[in-house]
Amino acid sequence: MLGQGFVSAAAIAASVLFILSLGGLSNQEKAKRAVWYGIIGMAVAVFFTAFGPGIGGYWLMIPMIIIGAIIGTRLARRVEMTEMPQLVAALHSFVGLAAVFVAWSADLERRRVLAARAVDGAMHDFSAFAALLAHKAPDELMFLQVEVVLGIFIGAVTFTGSVVAFGKLAGRIDGKPRQLPGGHLLNAGAAVLSLLLAILYLNGAGFWTLLLLAGLAFFIGYHLIMGIGGADMPVVVSMLNSYSGWAAAAIGFTLSNDLLIVTGALVGSSGAILSYIMCKAMNRNFVNVILGGFGGSTGPAAEIEGEQVAIDASGVASALNDADSVIIVPGYGMAVAQAQSAVSDLVRKLRAAGKQVRFAIHPVAGRLPGHMNVLLAEARVPYDIVLEMDEINDDFASTDVVIVIGSNDIVNPAAQEDPNSPIAGMPVLKVWEAKQVFISKRGQGTGYSGIENPLFYKENSRMFYGDARESLNALLPMVD
Amino acid sequence: MKIGAPKESVRGEARVALTPESATQIRKLGHACLIETGAGVAAGFDDQAYREAGVTIVDSAQALFDDADIVIKVREPSEQEAERLREGQTLIAFFWPAQNEAMLEKCRARGASVIAMDMVPRISRAQKMDALSSMANIAGYRAVIEAGNNFGRFFTGQVTAAGKVPPAKVLVIGAGVAGLAAIGTATSLGAVVRAFDVRPEVSEQIESMGAEFLFLDFDNAQDGSESGGYASPSSPEFREKQLECFRAQAPEVDIVITTALIPGRPAPRLWLEDMVAAMKPGSVVIDLAAEKGGNCDLTRADERVVSDNGVVVVGYTDYPSRMATQSSLLYATNIRHMLTDLTPDKDGVIQHNMEDDVIRGATVTHQGEVTFPPPPPKTKAIGAARPRAKEKAPTAEEKRALESAEFKSQTRRQAILLGMGGALMLLLGQVAPVSFMQHFIVFVLACFIGFQVIWKVSHSLHTPLMAVTNAISGIIILGAVLQIGSGSVIVGILAAISVLIATINIVGGFLVTRRMLAMFQKS
């Protein structure tokens, strides 16, 4: 058994390592080292805590860790990069559920300790957490109860919210926003009821209040995320990421464990920043996204003149052969069509012919922050030609050919040109400034937001209809 | 339909309206092609090349006019050619209807339809048949080559063992298609190029070609979009300003290429005698407007003149014909695009659709009637020029005032936030036990560190960031580990499940992050 000194030292080391691990993600090369900091930090934290004072139940703990490790490994090996959003959502739900369980257990322990105290007032031979509880003063125990309520509430919302997000991202639940009659009033009602339960619990009501509280929070999580559409999932997933952090921090308070608090705060602020970046990229505020739906338009949308002109693969190929500079704008459609390796082949061919090829990534392209970068990296596209919106947006005017693959709203000129458009003011990629734009698209439908895209009607735009992967594969042999 | 190209009858005209390449494309539209024997020789295409492209060779111009349904030509028809036209026949050529009213009347009287390639409206859709631009492009290129031929020095500056050579300074007046082509050619030869145009909206194009735009500070600048992208006459005051600017340039520049034309008017005089006199001996003036009287006082059409101080003034008018192969290729492609628009179903049947903006605009006689001038096109030529935002640089005081106001409001906002936060902490401190406050300090500091660190994360690594935060939020396993040894069975079970799923999270999260990061490769 290691002493408390070891455990505290390990906690400090782990906190520092976690911070280094997140900080290292500032660039691709450092990141490869940084992830090791995270792994070592986690190993140190778990090892020293598990062999710290007063810990028991190894016969249960160790097999569980081994089984969990095996499942985790298989999951990580098998997952396709296009399925990353689902995986991340699923993992969030685990943290949420674990937080609920730990908080419940904390309350059960509290009751056990209180009961033991009431019987004889003597210090029993309690193990780790219970021993800690036994030393707490009454006001500290009161605060513990508040923390338990927070832990359960945040954890439960994270759990069902993530499960629904997982379902939507994996396509098992319809991606459209859907709500029970009553809409957000139901959520508000559930929240008020939760507050009442929490007050009851603080005033000494039984364990049932916590069960009911979790039930209500489960409902809120489910209903809230069901009301949010598929394309807003980047915000939702980062929000849930943030919640899972706050849940961990709340549990940290309950357990008086600084390492949990630090880590939870890091994760929580990380998710919050990601949500903020996503919202800013859509020019919407956070509340608007979470409550679902686009803001009402302030007037009739500007009329679109012209017609959509289709083009076949040979037309695109000859334009590419003549071009010196090409920018590719990928979107969720590329992930759906699994077209990333076809894109990569095309890029390799064009680059071999001495053309400048780059990618322009909008912050909300895909269903997860940075989703497109990972897909392209998987298809072996070098990361130094994959650029952010701000880096490349001024270069479109001097570009010969832009290929838009499966994105719509993020290249919609109405956002800048039509003040009445529902997406007015959203920063978009200015693809229409290029000499020629080809849009690879399945059909003539509108994007997620249901807004007509004037880009498709511009005179330098050509529609390259068809499944993205098949279109690109048809295009490949014609490019030289 | 039979499409026929006669040999050009004007002396010295080397171009031809049909090339073997365009013939192949035209035949794909379902038409048959004819050509007068020897018509392409001067442009570098012999009869054999045409025959291989499936073109029928016709012995005489008369036979061709008799046989063809559509006659395609470069130059406007001669009297004799107009006589040969018959009712229902279509002629496609440069026609200049405004200057050739007699010829227009003659063609109308013969009952022929005439499509004037010089009347194709300047809208984006019609760019592919804009033969004026194709020819102007060639003229601009050739003007620089001609200048180089007459200029005794290098274009590009060099430092050689035999001494330093300064780069040639070229001034291009008029940044239409020809002007821009001249700018492009001259910059790629290494010259230092300046350019002037009365339409301020072309400054971007000029700068994009690598030349310096000579900016005239003048309020009533023209809006070129109103006149279909062409220049219009300018006011006397503007003209004075302009000449003043040129006069300042004259002693400096080595080569002047003038391309200023106003549709339907004689060319404006922009390079006056005194400017030529001010130029260095050996300098060259290439006047692309010579056919319309010239921009330079000394220009004589189709001649090379040397001034008293040794400045060469070149006034050739046949630049496209001097590059007959290239011009024929481009012109034939323009014609071919026109035919494509006239044959929308690709079945060899001409549909002379007078509703179509482009066809309507280019048609000058049709079905026995003169249809010139055309009504204004439905689509505007080019977007209205965005006026150059004249940014008034704020004065130093204004700037300082602005900055201090901003600083003050920021300070106020921060002070309010800090004050509110402090008050909240104080309230919390009143009710919360000491141990809680200690943990709370840790929490707040960790949030701050989190915000600082995460802002620096590269956008492209946001997915790995989520995966890694996912993994470390598995730290909740510690809570379960602390509880798993509890005496209570329920707590034991709950803790065991928590350990299991938190481990999945940790291991899965870290491994998938490693997998992702390994994929990021530098090129």
Image (cartoon, grey):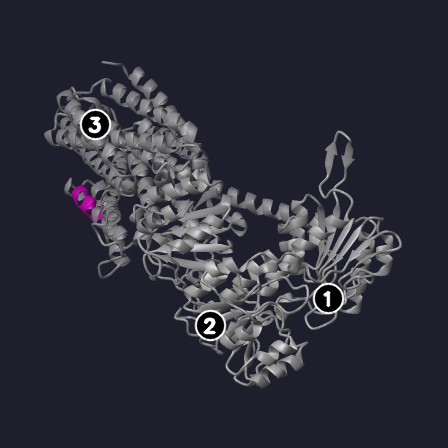
Q: Is residue B189 visible?
A: yes
Return the residue at label 2: B2
Residue under numbered circle 1: B291
Q: Amino acid at mark 2?
A: Lys
According to the picture, the residue beneath numbered tag 3 turns out to be A69
- In space, the residues marked 3 and 2 are separated at their CA atoms by 79 Å
Q: Quadrant of residue B265?
A: bottom right
Mark 3, other Cα within 10 Å: few <14 / some 14–19 / many ≥20: many
Q: Is residue B64 left or right of residue A219?
A: right
Viewer-proximal residue among B49 and B298: B49
Point out the frontmost of discs 1 and 2: 2
Q: Amino acid at mark 1?
A: Glu
Q: Is residue B377 visible?
A: no
The reply, left or right, for residue A295 in relation to residue B237 is left
Q: Is residue B208 above or below residue B75?
A: above
| Residue projecting furthest to the left | B489
Three-letter code, disc 3: Ala
- Local secondary structure at mark 3: helix
How many neighbours does mark 2 have within 10 angstroms: few (below 14), some (14-19), or many (20 or more)? some
Secondary structure at badge 1 equals: helix
Magenta part of the protein: which range?
A210-217
**Residue B435 rendering spot, x and y as whole percentages:** 33, 28
Q: Are marks 1 and 2 in contact (CB under 8 Å)?
A: no
**Residue A443, x across and y down, in percent:** 32, 60
Question: For the residues tagged 1 and 3, is the chain the same?
Answer: no
Q: Chain of mark 1?
A: B
> Is B114 within the magenta?
no
Quarter of the image containing the C terminus of chain A?
Answer: top left
Q: Residue at x 24, y 58 (%)?
A: A179
Quarter occupied by residue B445? top left
